[in-house]
Image (tube, rainbow, N blue to C red):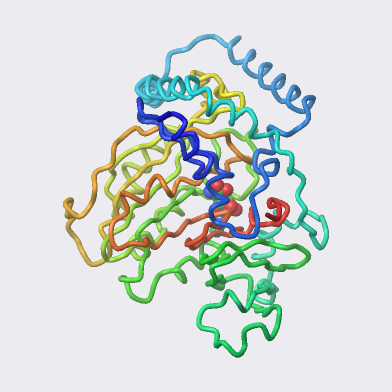
Amino acid sequence: SQKRDRLSLFLESGLYIFEDSNAIFVDPVRVLNRSYTRFRVSPSAYYTRFFESKSANQDSSSRFTSRKRKRNGREVRALNEREQIANQRHQEARPLLLKAHQSLLKSTGLLHVLNNLINDPSSSTECRDLSWQDVQQSFVELGQVWQAPLYEITLNLNPHDLPNINEDSRGMQCCEQRVLPAFNNLVANETKEDVDAEFLNSRFIIPRESAFYMSDLGQIHNLIPANADSGFNLIVVDPPWENASAHQKSRYPTLPNRYFLSLPIKQLAHTEGALVALWVTNREKLRNFVERELFPAWGVSYVANFFWLKVKPSGSLISDIDLSHHRPYENLILGYSHGKDTNSYDQSKFRSIKDNQVIMSVPGDYSRKPPIADLLLDYVPGFKPARCVELFAREMMAGWVAWGNEPLHFQDCRYFVER
Ligand code: SAM
């Protein structure tokens, strides 16, 4: 019955905590749905790649095996020093990952739900997009043209939901429209309900009590709070790291590592300190850069490493665990920023974090990360509710500030269905 409790908890929260290992299974759709009142995230739009036609899937897998075959055909050569370190890291992670995966395979109830993730009857989105053109990728481009300051976004607010509205004006109109600059501006939905927004020819859903700031990295200083005691207690960063291989084409612009050194993490952090969570791929060069240069430059002390293990709806791993250029996992590196005013790192202020936790989920669109905030909240220093920001965000969450050059990307109404 304990198992059933865990399953019913999972159905509500989207989080399944395994008792016998350091592992947790996350259904991003269920987790994200908790951010919305009038809409639901569409599973078929989230798990698109598993909804694609069979022939498309076969196509990509055959391409993959042929590449693999080529690689296997190559002469076996000795690993260089960096490859040896990477391999050692992998050998240490391997048993932890396999143990977590075993826990998933043993949970038949959860597996059953998982198998049905993509059999969503209400999968077609009802979104009445003003037009179905692909404006998505263009946020990045629009933000760069000279007209960028002229682009406006219209929030359709329901006066009933607005805080501090006087009673007389309630019910007078059905809707209050607020027109705001879309770029280089903090656009907030302070209400306790989802808000519908119009931008160019598309509709976007903005979760309750959230805000976005859409700009290039050059403008990020505008997010720095006027006084540090209104800074952030949780900072999640998913940088546009450059890819190792040219054939692995990115869907967004990437930046050389040195740009990330100047992210104002210290200035964004609350005086009480902040938990910093950084997504990193398995490239040894990156891991090394983060530990030796990036965290020190940010004033962040390393605390723990989590793994994100990617599985298919069938429960199997998305690729062979030992496939060196296509590992089925990525890393979330955690550290503490001690805040602006303190120079010394007072450990007692911060909770220690259990190392090597494994987060499993079925991945969404290319490089979309699972929402992991719930797993971190216990460790966030300072007062509750924590003030949270995501840097390089492509989506929004209730209660959060999202910054990046396309934070509305996954807020397009095509990713939602009406409740
Ligand atoms: N965490 C996101 C998710 O789960 O969907 C993925 C973030 S992706 C790895 C990195 C993001 O950084 C992309 O949206 C990219 O467009 C954005 N980006 C790249 N260069 C940027 C710049 N100069 N300023 C702001 N954002 C930038």
Q: Specify the quadrant that holds the C terminus.
A: bottom right
Residue 74 as seen in the image, left or right of residue 151: left
Q: Quadrant location of residue 100?
A: top left
Image label count: 0
Residue 355 as seen in the image, left or right of residue 139: left
Residue 83 as seen in the image, left or right of residue 273: right
User: Residue at 52% across / 44% down in the picture?
Assistant: 12
**Image x and y of residue 353, in percent:** 28, 41
Q: Quadrant location of residue 65?
A: top right
User: Residue at 81% across / 63% down in the picture?
Assistant: 130
**Image x and y of residue 405, in percent:** 59, 60
User: Residue at 69% across / 44% down in the picture?
Assistant: 45
In-front residue for pair 319/9: 9
8, above or below 159, in the image: above
Q: Specify the quadrant that holds the N terminus.
A: top left
**Image x and y of residue 42, in percent:** 68, 46
Q: Quadrant location of residue 346?
A: bottom left
69, above or below 85, in the image: above
